[in-house]
Amino acid sequence: MNSIANPRRIEAPLVTRLVATGQPATVIATVILSVLIISFRPFQPAGAQLVGQGGDIVNQLGFGTLGALSLASLFTLTDRRVLSALLSPWWLLLFGFLFLSILNTPAPSATMRSAAFSIIGIISMAAVLTLPRDADAFSRVLMVSACAILGLSYAGLVLFPNEAIHQGGEVEFQHAGLWRGVFTHKNIAGPVMASLSFVGIYLWRRGWRVSGGTIFILAMIFVAHTGSKTTAGTVPLAGLLVILPGMFGLRALVPIAVAIAFVGTGVATLGIVFIEPVKALANHMMPDLTYTGRTALWEFMGEMIAQHPWRGYGFESFWLTDVVLTSDQPFDRSWDIRGIVHGHNSYLDLAIAMGLPALAIALVTFVVTPLRDYWRTPLYRENVFMADLFMMIVTFTLLNGFLESFFFRRADPVWMFFVMAVLGLRLTGRFRVPSRVAR
């Protein structure tokens, strides 16, 4: 959290005194977070390609302005020590692979526009984390943003039901009646609402019982109506893995528990495709287990990664390209891969785009480093509560990443929450978080 020294009480300009209160920074952080999650095009059922689309003037102007606001805020309203703490050699390495994957595309200039939205999102999330001066200010940011997201999503069910609810006349008619709110798909709405439920838990633990409890209940009701049983089951799992050990004085075991859950989920999903003993066991015990046809998709991705293991196929240069569109479709494959936009697995999609070395760096950046940061978090009340919030989001999204794709997916709301949590753990592990800074 950021901290700004108080100016002189006498002869201080009005603007200086206003900035010193921290209120403008809190408002800016709230606006940035709300816009990042809701997007500049809410209630767009046409598909996720609208979010951050390179040729969309609304998104170009909107995200360009958001990025400029975030950069200006970072350089004028944040503590330099806090800002520098966000720099990580692993993130820099990952950005290097991202840049190389952009060059490894047929049209690098067009791909750069798509990557720019993801970079703007990361910068904006850094501003959301560093602008609030204390835990109270950060809580206000989360509370107002959560209320805006939930309020618009629930209002859409009544005012814009065709956009806020999946319809039978759409391509994925099987999702008819499932809620998506302001988002493009139930698979985005579910994880976002799951993250908001963790926000509710965090506010409740800090003593904000009414707002925290309300956000948690409304978010979980929405999760239930997205029809995602996986999300509904992963939310309590992530909560228990993070909070339960601390209740018995075993908080140091949380990273170990999360690591075991991560490896176990990987074996239960990708393992039944790529690990022969696990595959044989799954075929014997649960022969119909395909994760809604995803296993056939992952098998295809594995074959394609083996052809270009070191540098992949380039950022956003695999799906909906000739490589996929002209591939054969075996009659017994449960999923036609020629019309999908991602591989329903964040880890395989990253390897497809950037290669296996980039995936290895990503695992360190997204899994190992956050667990280490959580482990080193000092046992101050606010640090513990905030680190638990971020770890719940990280745990949930890492597990969800085995079934959905969101790494570097432009300004995907799930990706934004994940970035916030990973960067947030770097801060809670390095600085004491005050409950309230004297104004």
Image (cartoon, rainbow, N blue to C red):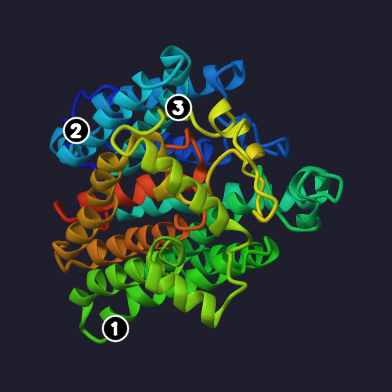
Q: Nearer the viewer, residue 163 or 94?
A: 94
Rendering coords of residue 404 (x, y %): 52, 52
- Residue in view at x 62 percent, y 30 percent: 326
Instruction: Kindly identify the amino acid type of the residue bearing the numbered disc 2.
Output: Arg
Q: Where is residue 1 in the image (x, y as percent from the top left)?
A: 25, 47
Give how far across and how far down residue 258 sits, in percent. 31, 69
**Mark 2 crowdedness (10 Å alpha carbons): few <14, some 14-19, many ≥20:** few
Circle 3 is placed at which residue position?
117
Residue 220 visible in the displayed image: yes
The crowd level at tag 1 (other Cα within 10 Å; few <14, some 14-19, many 20+) is: few
Q: Determine whether the residue tagged by mark 1 lies in a helix, strand or loop.
A: helix
Callout in the foreground (1, 3): 3
First of labels 2, 1 by sequence position: 2
Q: Label 1 amino acid?
A: Met
Q: Label 3's element?
A: helix
Please determine whether, in this image, residue 315 is positioned above or below residue 367.
above
Q: Which of marks 2 and 3 is nearer the N terminus?
A: 2
Q: Which of 298 and 77 is in front in this view?
A: 298
Q: What residue type is labelled 3?
A: Phe
Q: Which secondary structure lies at badge 2? A: loop
Quarter in which the C terminus is drawn? top left
Residue holding disc 1 = 247
Looking at the image, the residue that sits furthest to the right is 169
- Vertical relation: 259 (above or below) 43: below
Residue displayed at 39% across by 77% down: 240
Compute the Cα span from label 1 to label 3: 40 Å
* Picture coordinates of residue 307, whole percent (x, y): 38, 38
Q: Mark 2 to mark 1: distance in Å?
A: 44 Å
Residue beneath label 2, please? 9
